[in-house]
Image (cartoon, grey):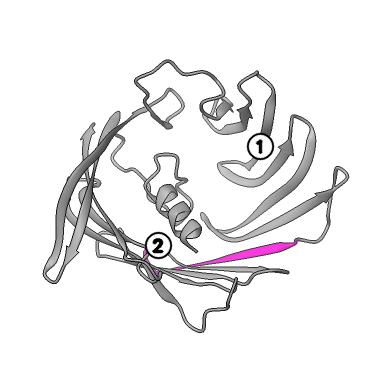
Amino acid sequence: MNFLYTLFFFVFLNAYSQNNSVLEEIKGNPKEYKETWYEAKKTKTGFLKGKYLHDDVYIKDSNGEFIKQSFFPTNKWDFPQNRYNDKKQKLETINYYDDGGIINRTEFFYDKNKVIQEKFYYNSDTIVSSVKYEYLNDLIIKKLEFDAEKGVLSDTPNSVITYQYDARNNMIKESHDSNFQNDVFSYVYNDKNFMTEFYSKLSFPVPDKESKLSMRFEYKKYDLHNWTEIYVEDDIDSDKKSKCYFIQREFKY
């Protein structure tokens, strides 16, 4: 369970998050931004900022994606390598070994401006799975996952994920239905459409009887488009003490 929460926390605050999911969208078309991370502590009256951890700088590339900057020279195997069409739609993502060989790659297929299918390959040409998306207007309402056997995709999905939204098009529920797990994730938002609480109801290893509060987000400051200061409380329902962070962001528009 700690792995799940850590993964969600990483993705939620990661600049590569997709706009069609519950994950955060950077708004206002900034050119770049910096995140400064601190430890934090929860008290009876709120949160306290603690020790400085690190800075991360993200700069928007020519295709409109934010790329995390490094102080050291990077190689193609350090980050996923993306290929785009003339509409700046991502067509392919490739991950490389440090010897230049391909670890895996993903192909993206579109219907106008909507991703309708992704295909995942091991090495360069061995297909292992596929995902198809169903939409209602511009919102994804269903994600169907298909496994492949000996290079042939199954006609029957092995997993189906359905999504529900509120009147402001915020995703409020994500339900996973597969042969092995039936998990439900729920999300609560404030009046600025930023997520404030994340709940989970997991079926593995021991089925949860009810949804549990897993993460909490307390926003302290905003600019005209995005939050600029936030406290994050993670691993709330675990057996260990919850982890808390304070994050500041500076945007250049």
105 sits to left or right of 89: right
Instruction: Specify the farthest residue to the top.
Output: 73
Does the magenta-highlighted stretch encompass residue 159? yes
Q: Which mark is residue 141?
A: none
Residue in the picture at 46% in, 27% down: 63
Q: Which mark is residue 170?
A: 2
Instruction: Specify the farthest residue to the front.
Output: 240
Residue 127 in which image quadrant: top right
Residue in the picture at 60% in, 41% down: 112
Magenta-highlighted residues: 158-170
Q: Dot 1, crowdedness within 10 Å: few (<14), some or many (≥20)? A: many
> For the residue labelled by badge 2, is the local secondary structure a helix, a strand or a loop?
loop
**At label 2, which amino acid type do we have?**
Asn
* Rendered location of residue 71, percent (x, y): 34, 20
Residue in the picture at 35% in, 68% down: 236
The residue pinned by badge 1 equals 106
* Rendered location of residue 230, percent (x, y): 22, 53
Instruction: Specify the farthest residue to the left.
Output: 45
Front position in the image: 54 or 144:
54
Q: Can residue 88 be seen in this snapshot?
A: yes
Total marks drawn?
A: 2
Front position in the image: 163 or 242:
242
Front position in the image: 3 or 145:
3
First-in-chain label (2 vs 1): 1
Does the magenta-highlighted stretch encompass residue 63? no
Q: Can residue 222 be seen in this snapshot?
A: no
Q: Is residue 111 above or below residue 75?
A: below
